[in-house]
């Protein structure tokens, strides 16, 4: 059993959970993920690692409560335990294996959207701890949906905020802010890393391409079972079939077929919506007639 040490609400429907998992904390690297089961009958949910502390033996995850299983995870309170937490899984970010002398000569820009801000944090933190500067753009629909801004300030060289409604920071999309930094503010970068909604990553990639800026994206949102066996995370990268959870979750953005990835992502939306409706009916004590009740 994996005890929950902290549980905090970051924004509406978005929870941060710190769990005691010393073996995972000792081995974790930026870019990797874990698989969580809320209880013994629970579904396996892959979640990107938002932070880890080998001395404390803790791993932090950020979960958006969208479906039945993620709601079970965020419902677990401090002092309770998860049935399973497995990991670390997936490939670490490429820069982890690069020589530090080369890395220190590079300038990174991270573009984070929504919940994607959480997995950006350990990457920027790792770079900061090794003397490499990185700028960060965090985007959200409105200021109330921004997360990890204070944590990011402590590790980023410069933090920029963009909100769709202009309620905080730059008024507009992260792509417009990225373009402004390069064309108007004279910023120069060697690598862009984008993590967030699939459509956001697609357009960040298109923007980066205008400036011949190498770009990396994380396709963690495609993962289902976290082992590659279910096949749900198949994606075409460089004309070849890859499995996000074993070959990624990070890939060269210019080689990703985003349209295919978005179609695959939408395949499971209807089933999850129906499962949520069934759970709600049962919680209210009604007999479910939606069609999945068995």
Image (spheres, rainbow, N blue to C red):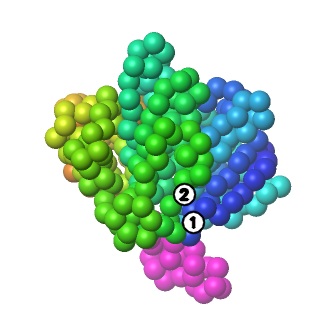
Foreground of the two, 228 or 195? 195
Residue 130 can be seen, yes or no: yes
Give the answer, above or below, for where 127 lies relative to 47. above
Tell me if mark 2 has few (under 14), some (14-19) or many (20+) residues whose alpha carbon lies within 10 angstroms of its own.
many
Foreground of the two, 86 or 49? 49
- Residues under numbered marks 1 and 2 in contact, where contact means CB atoms less than 8 Å apart: yes
**Marking on residue 147:** 2
Q: Is residue 106 magenta?
A: no
**Mark 1 to mark 2: distance in Å?**
7 Å
Looking at the rendering, the stretch of residues picked out in magenta corresponds to 270-294
Give the answer, above or below, for where 180 lies relative to 281. above
Q: Is residue 291 magenta?
A: yes
Foreground of the two, 286 or 212? 212
Q: Residue at x 72, y 30 (%)?
A: 54
Element at label 2:
loop
Q: Quadrant of the C terminus?
A: bottom right
Q: Residue at x 31, y 28 (%)?
A: 190
Place of residue 215 in the rendered image (x, y in percent of width and height, measured from the top left):
30, 35
Give the answer, above or below, for where 77 lies relative to 198. below
Residue 241 can be seen, yes or no: no
Give the answer, above or below, for where 188 lies relative to 158. above
Q: Quadrant of residue 142?
A: bottom left
Mark 1 or mark 2, which has the lower sequence index?
1
Q: Quadrant of the N terminus?
A: top right
Q: Residue at x 54, y 42 (%)?
A: 121
Q: Residue at x 49, y 22 (%)?
A: 96
Q: Quadrant of residue 87?
A: top right
Residue of label 1? 11
Place of residue 223 in the rendered image (x, y in percent of width and height, measured from the top left):
44, 46
């Amino acid at each position: 059993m994996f005890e929950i040490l902290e549980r905090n609400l970051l924004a509406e429907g978005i929870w941060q959970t710190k769990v005691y998992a010393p073996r995972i904390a000792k081995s974790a690297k930026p870019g990797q993920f874990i698989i969580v089961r809320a209880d013994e009958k629970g579904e396996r949910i892959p979640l990107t690692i938002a932070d880890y502390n080998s001395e404390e033996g803790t791993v932090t995850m950020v979960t958006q409560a969208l479906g039945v299983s993620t709601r079970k995870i965020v419902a677990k309170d401090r002092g309770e335990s998860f049935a399973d937490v497995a990991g670390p899984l997936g490939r670490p970010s490429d820069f982890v294996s690069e020589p530090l002398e080369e890395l220190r000569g590079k300038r990174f820009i991270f573009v984070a959207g929504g919940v994607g801000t959480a997995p950006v944090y350990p990457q920027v933190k790792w770079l900061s701890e090794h003397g490499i500067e990185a700028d960060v753009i965090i985007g959200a629909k409105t200021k109330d949906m921004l997360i990890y801004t204070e944590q990011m300030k402590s590790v980023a060289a410069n933090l920029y905020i963009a909100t769709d409604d202009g309620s905080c920071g730059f008024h507009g999309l992260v792509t417009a802010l990225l373009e402004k930094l390069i064309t108007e503010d004279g910023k120069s970068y060697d690598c862009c890393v984008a993590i967030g909604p699939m459509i956001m990553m697609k357009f960040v990639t298109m923007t980066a391409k205008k400036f011949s800026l190498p770009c990396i994206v994380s396709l963690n949102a495609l993962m289902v079972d976290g082992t590659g066996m279910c096949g749900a995370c198949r994606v075409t990268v460089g004309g070849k079939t890859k499995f996000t959870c074993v070959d990624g979750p990070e890939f060269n953005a210019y080689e990703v077929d985003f349209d295919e990835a978005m179609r695959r992502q939408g395949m499971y939306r209807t089933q999850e919506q129906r499962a949520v409706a069934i759970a709600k009916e049962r919680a209210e004590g009604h007999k479910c007639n939606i069609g999945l009740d068995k």
